[in-house]
Image: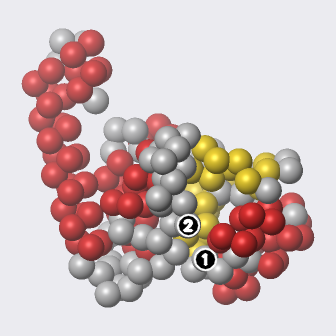
Amino acid sequence: MKFYGLLFGREREADSLFAVVEKNYQALSEKANQSRITRSVLPDRKVGPVWYLPGGESSVGLLYKDAHGVYAYAKDKHSGSLSMPFETVLDKFGQSDFWILSYRGDFNRAKLLAEFQGYSMLKPCRTGEIYGCKVDSIPYFEEVSWRPDWLLSDLIQLFHPDLHIAPMRYYHKLK
């Protein structure tokens, strides 16, 4: 945000907008730290033979930390993606409390399970705690770089169901 402000000669406006986002982000993170309930996340899904997971120092990994949630690779030092076979994901994330993923088009739990039968071994499949973001109609990729506080709000509510901050913007429970 600050870079684009500098690039377009709108530094003051960019600094002002950045300050609003930063203040909101920090307040949300502090609120998450006060929660009495903390759940664990399983992110994304299998692509071909591997599952790509955010490294602990990636932007998403840092969002999980700031949301004060449980993420199996939180202590990992990679800033990019980690590619894992399903067996490793099952071992590390099989008992996660909820699953978040993105999708396009018409999608539901039945279609997810039809993609790969191994998913049925994951706790979120048994409990129904699967949340999706329909990225072809929700401007997730267009917004989160500018408003990480909005994504943090969703993540906090998933990690800490006792906190009701606002309606979730990106994720909804898959049926």
Mark 1 surroundings within 10 Å by alpha-carbon count, few (fewer than 14), some (14 through 19), many (20 or more): many
Residue denoted by label 1: 96
Residue 111 lies, with reference to residue 129, above or below; the image says: above
In this picture, residue 34 sits left or right of residue 138 = left
* Residue 151 visible somewhere in the drawing: no
Q: Which quadrant, please, contains the N terminus?
A: top left
Coloration of the structure image = secondary structure
Residue 143 lies, with reference to residue 167, above or below; the image says: above
- Is label 2 or label 1 in front? 2
Q: Which quadrant, please, contains the C terminus?
A: bottom right
Q: Quadrant of residue 19?
A: top left
Q: Which mark is residue 72?
A: 2
Which type of secondary structure does the marked residue at label 1 adopt? loop
Q: Residue at x 38, y 85 (%)?
A: 37
Q: Which mark is residue 54?
A: none
Asked if the residues shown at circle 2 and circle 1 are in contact, with their CB atoms under 8 angstroms apart, the answer is yes
Q: Quadrant of residue 31?
A: bottom left
